[in-house]
Structure formats: C-alpha cells, structure tokens
Amino acid sequence: MGKHHKNTLRRIKLVCDIVQRHYEPGNYAKSYYRVWQRYVNPVYPMSYHTLIKYINTPLGELREAGEDDKQQLKLFKDD
C-alpha cells in the first residue's frame, strides 16, 4: 500500500478502533463482514474491500500520522 495522507491515516485508525471494539474471532455474528455492515459502513461509507485494506495497513504508518512535523512552525505556544 502506498503512502497515505494524514487524514486518511486518521480515518484508518478510527475505523480500526471500531473493528477492535466489535470484532470477535470465531463468532460469525461478529465477523469482519458483520462489523463492517453494522458499525463501520453507516459511519464511514466504504466497501468491504476497503475495510480489509484498512485492517491490513502496517502499524508504522499509523504511528507516523500521530507525530507532528518538527519543521512546521506553531502559531500559538503550548503552555
């Protein structure tokens, strides 16, 4: 998977959080498809194939999204 934009990485993280809350291995009623159908698709409209791509996104890319750009100047000081 190629490089993602910052907002796409944030959306992937939010979707993965929803899946982790509701997915239960071995339980068909709580399979990836059912979680996508009941919880993910109403909030973040996407195909099932996109959900599987999001789940398989390496964690390193998601961690990079949380870090601030060190070269970016800040408008206000954090106190």
Image (cartoon, rainbow, N blue to C red):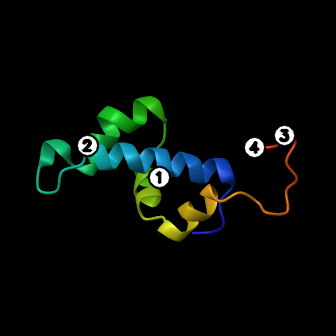
Callout 2: helix, strand or loop?
A: helix
Residue 23 position, x and y percent, is 24, 48
The CA distance from mark 1 to mark 4 is 37 Å
Quarter-of-image position of residue 68 = bottom right
Name the residue carrying label 1. Answer: 50
Q: Secondary structure at mark 3?
A: loop
Q: Secondary structure at mark 1?
A: helix
Query: Which image quarter holds the N terminus?
Result: bottom right
Q: Using the numbered discs, state the Cα–Cα distance from disc 3 to disc 1 in whole angstroms.
A: 37 Å
Q: Say left or right for 20 vs 28.
A: right
The amino acid at mark 4 is Asp
**Residue 58, placed above or below residue 28:** below
Question: At numbered mark 4, what does the secondary structure look like: helix, strand or loop?
Answer: loop
- Horizontal side of residue 43 vs 68, given as left or right: left
Mark 2 to mark 4: distance in Å?
36 Å
- Marks 2 & 3, CB-CB < 8 Å contact: no
For discs 2 and 3, the disc positioned in front in the rendered view? 3
Q: Quadrant of the C terminus?
A: top right
Closest to the camera, between mark 2 and mark 4, is 4
